[in-house]
Image (tube, rainbow, N blue to C red):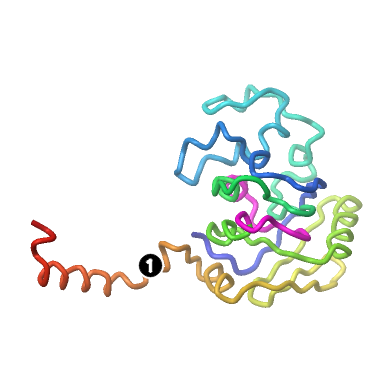
Amino acid sequence: MRKFTQLDGLVAPLDRANVDTDAIIPKQFLKSIKRSGFGPNLFDEWRYLDHGEPGMDHAKRTPNPNFVLNQPRYEGAAILLTRDNFGCGSSREHAPWALEDFGLRALIGVSFADIFFNNCFKNGLLPIRLSKPEVDELFAQTLQQPGYRLRIDLKAQTVTRPDGKVLRFEVEAFRKHCLLDGLDEIGLTLRHADKIREFEARRRFEQPWLFA
């Protein structure tokens, strides 16, 4: 998992509430468990005017010019502004995979669905909860200022606006530690690899019948 320490990124505003995981990555793209390759199908039904299926040549598809992530001013965005209850619906882990694979590293909104919120931290994506007035102001500034960027410092737990105003956010200490060090659940387990090998060797010696 990629570490998350600081980010200076372009912001894109997705001004919709209750965005569910089937909108983030539609069900027909869930066959793979490789964690990569989902970016081109992020928000597929909103990004394209035709119906998407696995294996399609995206260069031949017609993008929806009205969808925010297709607009040139938001190309290369690393931060997505969201509204209430982002990531609701099914618990598919493919949703944060698709967001991260697209190039997004952080989400900022008032609230996120619980399972989606947890899955983001497990996949190197930082979901930041701010107050509604703070999020409303970020939306307004992003729409008014092309090239609008924010600076996020996970260690300090701050979001700094272009005008210098600092917004502070809360993050649980263990999740913060894992993101700063780039540790997912597998990485956390592998820190104890020597002890695991010692245990397995001892068990093989003490209970050889289990390995016959």
Examine the structure image and report whether residue 189 is included in the region drawn in magenta.
no
Residue 34 higher or lower than 118, as above or below: above
User: Hey, which quadrant is residue 167 in on the image?
Assistant: bottom right
Q: Is the residue marked by circle 1 packed among few (<14), some (14-19), or many (20+) residues within 10 Å?
A: few
Question: In x, y percent, where is residue 5?
Answer: 60, 69
Up-down: is 157 above or below 67? below
Q: Amino acid at mark 1?
A: Thr
Local SS, label 1: helix
Task: Specify whether 180 is left or right of 196.
Answer: right
Q: Residue at x 73, y 34 (%)?
A: 46
Residue 29: quarter of image: top right
Counting from the top left corner in percent of width and height, residue 122 is at 53, 60
Which residue is found at the position 62% from the left and 73% from the top?
172
Q: Is residue 178 left or right of residue 193?
A: right
Q: Nearer the viewer, residue 173 or 180?
A: 173
Magenta stretch in the rendered image: 98-116
Residue 182 lies, in percent from the top left, at 50, 66
Pinpoint residue 4: horizontal percent, then vertical percent.
58, 65
Q: According to the image, label 1 marks what residue? A: 189
Query: Residue at 22% across / 72% down in the picture?
Result: 199
Q: Quadrant of the C terminus?
A: bottom left
Q: Residue at x 63, y 76 (%)?
A: 155
Compared with residue 43, is residue 137 higher up or lower down, i.e. above or below? below
Q: Is residue 100 left or right of residue 163?
A: left
Q: How many marks?
A: 1
> Which of 83 and 74 lies nearest the eye of the viewer?
83
